[in-house]
Amino acid sequence: MAQRPPIEVTQEELKRQRACMAQVKDSAAGGKYKIVTYGCQMNAHDSETLAGMLTEMGYEPTEDVALADVVLFNTCCIRDNAERRVAGNISALSALKRERPGMILGVCGCMTQQEGAPESLLRRFPHVDLVFGTHNLFRFPELLLEVLQSGRRVTEIDRDERGRIADGLPVRREGGVTGYLNIMFGCNNFCSYCIVPYVRGRERSRTIAQVVREAEEMAKSGLKEIMLLGQNVNSFGLDGESGENFPLLLRALDGVVPRIRFMTSHPKDLSDALIEEMARSHSVCPQFHLPVQSGSDRILMEMNRRYTRAHYLERVNALRSAIPQVGLTTDIIAGFPGETEQDFEDTLSLVRQVRYDAAFTFIYSPRQGTRAAAMDGQIAEAVKHERLDRLIKLQESSTREQLDSCVGSVQDVLVEGPSRRRQGEISGRTGRGMTVNFAGAPDWVGRIVPVRITASGANTLRGEYDKSGNEEMNK
Ligand code: 5AD
Ligand code: SF4
């Protein structure tokens, strides 16, 4: 495929946004905002950028939507239930808008980027003031200003699928010890079930220098762990001529923060170089999210995943031999069109074989405009549900088994905060990503401490601080 260098949003355009932010700040001093976020980490991080821009514009966050002057719905359309929830929640705000007509209600994110969606949103929800998309998120200040000044409804969607990169936007990260960092945007894979390539555009990567600069700022602000985000992080750098790639990025980031994780990876692009770099790196955690989607070669082909079950298992083996303690997680879809009982059995047997730490399991949901939505052999809802239930049960036993295998070991745990389960305890995660609850002081948050694992539950571990262990500043 012909590639072109990423189109950076120009300094001129960013300057215009900064000027709009200043103008809004003058007019909206003291206002409050609420962002309602749906979907994946990408969306969560986009919301942090929107929050950063709102903060620059003088707004303050509120948890109570009834007090908000600006409400944004950052939407997801990956499955039908995500879209239905968004629609229900937008609809529920119509009474509030009648009481407080000055409140500005905006809808953005993946849902708005679909063909015909903005028109349909405006028609169904007369109380929505502003609709914008994923490709022009950086223009939010300008669009908000237009609504404030004109009092009219504003819709602005950029339909250029190549997408662009806006570097240097303000970000207001959610609290905690971990921060999200976008390294690339978009997806070129066109898995036949997936709407993402249509709403997030083509792959485009930031430069290593840009990513490292942001990571250093995050470290300076006190974050201990960075989650690198991209639809397919293995393709980082490959869209340009720079010669940069994901293993080189990991090398450049090593030591910037104590812990680095990343998601999501595509099994077809998981290289030996990446595995070697992970094994070598001090910061990269021994955790790998490797979506398999199905264990049947026939279904993988229909899904346009471009790998076989054997290839996937070979990559799993390569990971495990280089990084024996690695924890694997995955995504699986049950009930893809044409999936027979035998195909589904193949998925179950793959799950049995790999023994994942965790799996995100989904019922296939037809997405308009994708190839799979038009395929013959759509599976009845009841069958999809029944398969999902079996899959979840199997995964639960695998999760228990993996947690159990850690009992007796000493793990480095990054303390995240007070335990949600037990009063007086704190909670953190192992390098592999497992949650551990143990007795400790609240001011340990952000430290990596050795913990002896004493017991395992359905989803978490219990342990005790290991006084004899060395407190390390890695993984
Ligand atoms: N139906 C069900 N699950 C889907 N996913 C993506 N598209 C669909 C769909 N149409 C799942 C995949 C992907 C995860 C983020 O969402 O498993 O890896
Ligand atoms: Fe969707 Fe496939 Fe791209 Fe993941 S790799 S975002 S599943 S098209």
Image (cartoon, rainbow, N blue to C red):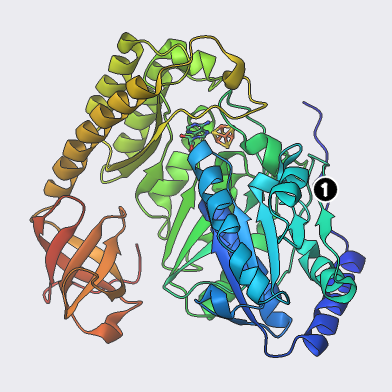
> Which residue is labeled 1 in the image?
158
Relative to 287, residue 49 above or below: below
Relative to 118, residue 99 above or below: below
Q: Quadrant of the N terminus?
A: top right
Crowd band around label 1 with a 10 angstrom C-alpha radius: few (<14), some (14–19), many (20+):
few
Q: In this view, does 311 lie to the left or right of 393?
A: right
Taking the view exactly as shown, the residue that stands out farthest to the right is 12
Relative to 246, residue 430 above or below: below
User: Nearest the camera: 82 or 461?
Assistant: 82
Residue 22 found in image quarter: bottom right
**In the image, what residue occupies the spot 47% across and 74% down?**
223
Q: Quadrant of the C terminus?
A: bottom left
Question: What amino acid does circle 1 point to?
Answer: Asp
Q: Is residue 216 left or right of residue 137?
A: left
Q: From the top left corner, tell me how far across and down residue 205 is, in percent.
A: 69, 48
Residue 5 found in image quarter: top right
**In the image, what residue occupies the spot 66% across and 78% down?**
69
Query: Quick check: can you spot residue 243?
Result: no
Query: Quick check: can you spot residue 395?
Result: yes
**In the image, what residue occupies the spot 41% across and 14% down?**
339
Q: From the top left corner, tell me how far across and down residue 371 is, in percent.
A: 63, 20
Q: How many labels does the image show?
A: 1
Q: In this view, does 217 lie to the left or right of 223?
A: right
Q: From the top left corner, tell me how far across and down residue 170 is, in percent.
A: 69, 73
User: Nearest the camera: 447 or 126?
Assistant: 126
Q: From the top left corner, tell me how far across and down residue 268 is, in percent.
A: 52, 27
Q: What element carries label 1?
A: loop
